[in-house]
Image (cartoon, rainbow, N blue to C red):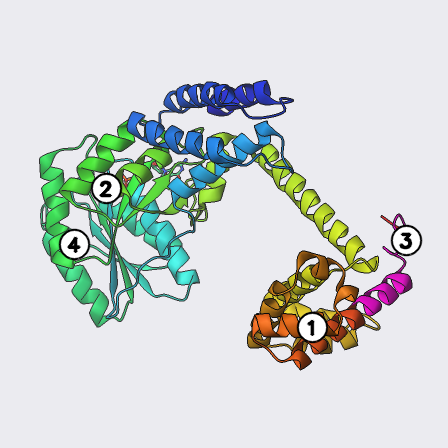
Amino acid sequence: TLSDRLTSVLQNLRGKGKLSDADIDATAREIRIALLEADVALPVVRAFIGRVKERAKGAEVSAALNPAQQVIKIVNEELVAILGGETRRLNLAKNPPTVIMLAGLQGAGKTTLAGKLAMWLKKQGHAPMLVACDLQRPNAVTQLQIVGERAGVVTFAPEPGNGVGDPVDVARRGIEEARRAQHDVVVVDTAGRLGVDEELMKQAADIRDAVRPEETLFVVDAMIGQDAVTTAEAFRDGVGFTGVVLTKLDGDARGGAALSVREVTGQPILFASNGEKLEDFDVFHPDRMASRILGMGDMLSLIEQAEQAFDQDQAEQAAQKLTSGQLTLEDFLEQMLAVRKMGPIGNLLGMLPGAGQMKDQIAAVDDKQLDRLQAIIRGMTPAERADPKLINGSRRLRIANGSGVAVREVNDLVNRFFEARKMMSQMAGRFGFGGGGGGSK
Ligand code: GDP
Ligand code: MG
């Protein structure tokens, strides 16, 4: 499988110090084969590999991750990006009812989805109605009615005994009924064929023109692999759609279809179906699908942990410096910028005993002042920034002139800095970290 393949490919990389071009090319070749084996369409594979290679070559060697982890991270990020990044929400009509039309091959899971969607919409506070426009198969209407009953919603269906009705007419009357009964969302179920054919497309297009849907959802079985591309293209050209729903993700499909449909049609995947029951349904999560395609959930969380540990290390180092009395003006400015960026977190400082004073100092600084402080510090020589004790009267005048402020402001900054440094050292002593170094860890 794809994941087996990628795992073995990336195992080859493990333990190597630096990612060379040859490494990346070899890896890319293997990932390419693996994606093709997973039924991802060729043009999609090409585009994907191109992006991964480019990024891997341009990437700085990470201090937190080994080369193998770095490649996995890039592959995963690119997958998430293709699959749509953030999940898109359903578009609702300004003037209800919102019409959602379902389209797709027979057996894709449209009728089942109609029930799932209805139940989901109900939970969100909507009053949905189903409309049965699949008049192709004798039991299709009954199937939708049963599904609707389970979901606890009304189903609009043609009166029995009138022979084969006209689905376009049923669709139109269904919307009228929804408006009259004040349903705010209407889900229109349509007929499918086993293969793409013109009559089917024409019927779907006619229904579309009759009901003017806010969303047309292309429903596709995740198991169909390579065929997903031709089917999606046929529906895009024949009916057009605004979103995709992947079904049967409870099976062992590797997700190749998701990647292909998304990349080829550019339309977002909105929902995922993963079972026959009405509850087996969720909004689509690109990150989860990416990790499914890679089959490396464990590896991905390891990477996350490694990065977090690294960040924490960096933070500890910064704290050491801060509390060891070695604070420079550069650090001071950085800290102020950081605390301001954190916003309300700055308030937490007030909860530390003895830190109230520092909180007040930070609160007293607004963004404009920060800009001025930055200008002053930039006006100092590196030596002055590193060792502010150097900054005597004549240096203060030079700095003030150079950065266009009054000498008083330079004095202010320098004094505030010394205060902060003193306070940091005191705090360090009180909490028993930093200071002489090697205190606690
Ligand atoms: P339609 O022809 O597009 O309306 O497809 P149906 O809704 O009738 O579904 C065809 C078959 O697939 C039925 O037996 C459903 O129970 C089944 N099915 C639909 N969605 C899923 C799913 O997400 N997982 C599984 N395992 N089966 C599904
Ligand atoms: Mg059906």
Q: Is mark 2 within 8 Å of ligand 2?
A: no
Query: Which marked residue is nearer to the observer: mark 1 or mark 2?
Result: 1
Q: Nearer the viewer, residue 416 or 204?
A: 416
**Hey, what amino acid is under mark 2?**
Asn
First in sequence: mark 3 vs mark 1 = 1
Q: Secondary structure at mark 4?
A: loop
Can I make out residue 350 in this image? no
First in sequence: mark 4 vs mark 3 = 4
**Hey, what amino acid is under mark 4?**
Pro
First in sequence: mark 1 vs mark 2 = 2
Q: Secondary structure at mark 3?
A: loop
Q: CA distance from mark 4 to mark 3?
A: 84 Å
**Hey, what amino acid is under mark 3?**
Gly
First in sequence: mark 2 vs mark 4 = 2
User: In this figure, which residue is indicated by the disc labeled 3?
Assistant: 436
- Residue at point 72% right, 78% down? 360
**Hey, what amino acid is under mark 1?**
Arg
Q: CA distance from mark 2 to mark 4?
A: 13 Å
Q: Is mark 3 within 8 Å of ligand 1?
A: no
Q: In x, y percent, where is residue 26?
A: 47, 18
Which residues, given as a range, are shown in magenta? 421-439
Q: Is residue 426 magenta?
A: yes
User: In this figure, which residue is indicated by the disc labeled 1?
Assistant: 396
User: In this figure, which residue is indicated by the disc labeled 4?
Assistant: 158
Q: Is residue 245 magenta?
A: no
The answer to which image quadrant residue 264 occupies is top left
Query: Which marked residue is nearer to the observer: mark 1 or mark 4?
Result: 1
Q: In x, y percent, where is residue 424?
A: 81, 65
**Residue 72 appears left or right of 86:** right
**Residue 246 appears left or right of 76:** left
User: In this figure, which residue is indicated by the disc labeled 2?
Assistant: 139
